[in-house]
C-alpha cells in the first residue's frame, strides 16, 4: 500500500477561518480509497465541535442525509455508543474539545462512484475543556448515490480554527 499526497492545508494562528475545503479542484479521481489526516487541531474557542460534509460539483452537501455510528471513549466516564440519522453533517467531535491539540484520521470510500454510497471511517484523540482525554471511532455514510470530490471540515463556532494541519492522500 502506498500513500500519494493530493493536498496539504496548514492554518496557524488564524482568526475567522471556520471552513477548510479539501479536494474540489485538487481532487484526483484515480484512487478508490483516500486518507485524511488532521493534526494539531485547535479551535479558537473551547467547547467547539468539529464537523465534516461531503462535496460534489464545487458545493458542500448540507441535506439531512448523513448517518453515523460511533463509540466514545473517555478517561473520566464510561464509554458510550452514539448514532445519528438524517443529519445535515457528520459530527466528528460530537462532544466539545478543548484548547489542547487534537488528531483525527479518516478514510474515505466510494467517493468516485456514482452508483454507491460514499462512506467514511474515522478515529480521533483529543482533550476536552475539562482536561480529560477522549477518543472516538466510528463511521458514516451519505444516503445519496452520487460521486463526491472532496470534503468540508468546519467548526461549530464562528471564529474557527486557531491552528490545523490537514493532509489528503490517495491510497493505492
Image (spheres, rainbow, N blue to C red):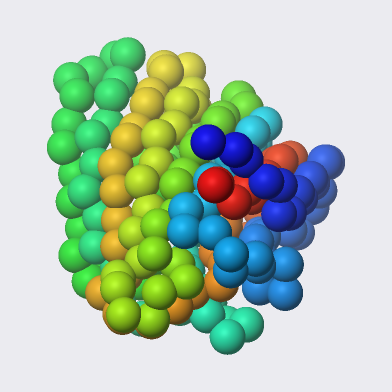
User: At which x and y percent is residue 82?
Assistant: 19, 44
| Residue lying at 79% horizontally and 45% vertically, measured from the top left | 10
Seen from the viewer's position, the closer of residues 6 and 86 is: 6
Furthest residue in direction bottom, as rendered:
57
Q: Quadrant of residue 122?
A: top left
| Residue lying at 62% horizontally and 48% vertically, measured from the top left | 169
Compared to residue 11, the image places residue 128 above or below, namely: above
In the image, 158: left or right of 146?
A: right
Residue 168 showing in the rendered view: yes
Furthest residue in direction right, as rendered:
13
Q: How many marks?
A: 0
User: At which x and y percent is residue 25?
Assistant: 72, 74
Compared to residue 112, the image places residue 128 above or below, namely: above
Compared to residue 138, the image places residue 63 above or below, namely: below
Compared to residue 74, the image places residue 123 above or below, namely: below
| Residue lying at 39% horizontally and 64% vertically, measured from the top left | 110
Residue 155 showing in the rendered view: no
In the image, 85: left or right of 134?
A: left
Seen from the viewer's position, the closer of residues 160 and 92 is: 92
User: At which x and y percent is residue 52?
Assistant: 48, 59
Seen from the viewer's position, the closer of residues 51 and 146 is: 146
Amino acid at each position: 500500500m502506498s500513500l500519494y499526497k493530493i493536498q496539504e492545508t496548514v492554518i496557524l494562528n488564524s482568526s475567522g477561518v471556520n471552513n477548510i475545503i479539501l479536494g474540489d479542484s485538487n481532487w484526483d479521481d484515480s484512487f478508490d480509497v483516500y486518507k485524511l489526516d488532521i493534526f494539531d487541531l485547535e479551535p479558537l474557542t473551547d467547547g467547539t465541535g468539529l464537523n465534516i460534509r461531503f462535496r460534489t460539483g464545487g458545493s458542500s452537501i448540507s441535506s439531512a442525509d448523513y448517518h453515523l455510528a460511533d463509540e466514545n471513549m473517555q478517561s473520566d466516564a464510561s464509554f458510550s455508543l452514539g448514532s445519528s440519522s438524517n443529519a445535515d453533517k457528520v459530527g466528528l467531535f460530537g462532544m466539545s474539545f478543548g484548547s489542547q491539540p487534537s488528531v483525527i484520521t479518516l478514510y474515505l470510500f466510494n467517493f468516485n462512484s456514482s452508483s454507491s454510497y460514499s462512506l467514511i471511517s474515522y478515529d480521533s484523540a483529543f482533550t476536552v475543556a475539562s482536561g480529560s482525554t477522549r477518543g472516538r471511532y466510528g463511521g458514516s455514510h451519505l444516503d445519496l448515490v452520487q460521486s463526491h470530490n472532496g470534503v468540508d471540515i468546519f467548526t461549530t463556532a464562528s471564529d474557527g480554527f486557531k491552528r490545523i494541519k490537514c493532509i489528503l492522500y490517495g491510497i493505492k
